[in-house]
Amino acid sequence: MRMQLHEKTSANSDGAVAPKRGTGGSPVCAHQKQECDEAIAMLTSLKRLAGRQTQPARCRRSPILRHALVPIMIALVCFSPLARGAILERLKNGENLTVAAIGTSLTATDWGFWFQPTGDWLNSQGFPGKVTLANRAVCGSASKLVPGTADYRDGVSQLADMLAKDNPDAVFIEFGINDAYLQYKISKQASRANLQSMIDQIRVWAAKQNQGKGKNVEIVVQTMNNCVKAHAEQRPELAQYYQGYREIALANKGVLFIDTYHKWLDLYNSQPDHATWNSYVPDGIHPNAQGAKEIIVPSVQQALQGQLNGSGRSPNFTSKE
């Protein structure tokens, strides 16, 4: 069965799986240790934020109360439905998933020839009809545009639309290639901060779903292809922007990072005339359907399979644990 592609709306059941029980009768979350570590990191960040902005002064002055609440908060998060698991694992467990994407023209329906085939592949792995796609990517967009730049929907707007209308279970993010675009005036530091903000927003939103019980939302961060000629001249520090995406993704536990950039570079450098690369990226920046089929889709497939069996630890696909 061919998947449905939702440009504006999408709905699904989150299909929460009941936790297994340990020998002592207490709930045991999937990937419990990883998720508790992640919860601690998240709560540490929340504590810092609360201390700076919203926490009452009397609480800041009461370390005993503050420290007493931390274990309780960690326990609530660790034993909630927020535990994250591999996308294929969740499909294997019978869940219906809405897989969403936000990004640039490299993902948008007009040029992003990898997203639909990825969904088709997921549905073909013994899970027909289990996956619905929601593609919010917009040509020409970046993570967060500054005032005075082109009037495109940026990543923050795409994310808001997606969370409001699509109820996603997995989110793919790629904006690096346009964050590096000189005319958009997005610094490398701002690019990193925007990505971190999107990751945080997804997790805060996920924690509020199901009447506050939370839901699983997988987050996948991608780097895409290199570019040539005028496109490269307009993005002289593209590699550094992609490196920022790598570092932010790997700094967030549970986020899957897929690095197709180095695969594209390897292909580009494999021939003196770059003939194959040129045939896959004929305009110098947008991979065609063949390029997506040969480079991007296999990279995504390998990453998701590696996430399931624990072998996805190469530089091309890594999830910090």
Image (spheres, helix red, strand yellow):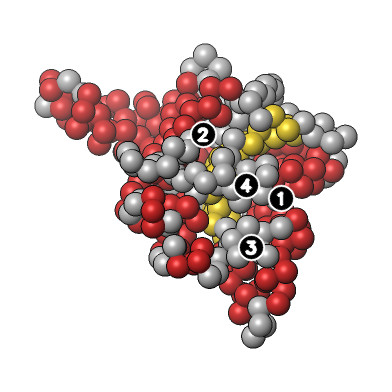
- Residue 107 numbered mark, or none: 4
- Residue 223 numbered mark, or none: none
On the image, which quarter does residue 64 sit in?
A: top left
Q: Nearer the viewer, residue 255 or 72?
A: 255
> For mark 1, does the 10 Å Cα neighbourhood hold few (<14), some (14 to 19), or many (20 or more) residues?
many
The structure residue drawn at horizontal position 84% and vertical position 43%, both measured from the top left corner, is 124
**Lower position in the chain sequence, tag 1 or tag 2:** 1
Left or right: where 49 falls relative to 13: left
The structure residue drawn at horizontal position 39% and vertical position 57%, both measured from the top left corner, is 182
What secondary structure is found at the residue carrying circle 4? loop
Q: CA distance from mark 3 to mark 2?
A: 26 Å
State whether residue 36 is above or below residue 240.
above
- Residue 158 numbered mark, or none: 2
Instruction: Mark 3 and mark 4 in contact? Answer it, CB < 8 Å.
Output: no
Q: CA distance from mark 4 to mark 1?
A: 7 Å
Q: CA distance from mark 1 to mark 2?
A: 19 Å
Instruction: Mark 1 and mark 2 in contact? Answer it, CB < 8 Å.
Output: no
Left or right: where 309 falls relative to 217: right
The structure residue drawn at horizontal position 73% and vertical position 47%, both measured from the top left corner, is 118
The residue to which callout 3 is attached is 283
Residue type pointed to by label 3 = Asp
The residue to which callout 1 is attached is 113
What secondary structure is found at the residue carrying circle 1? loop
The structure residue drawn at horizontal position 48% and vertical position 28%, both measured from the top left corner, is 160
Q: Is residue 95 visible?
A: no
**Lower position in the chain sequence, tag 3 or tag 2:** 2
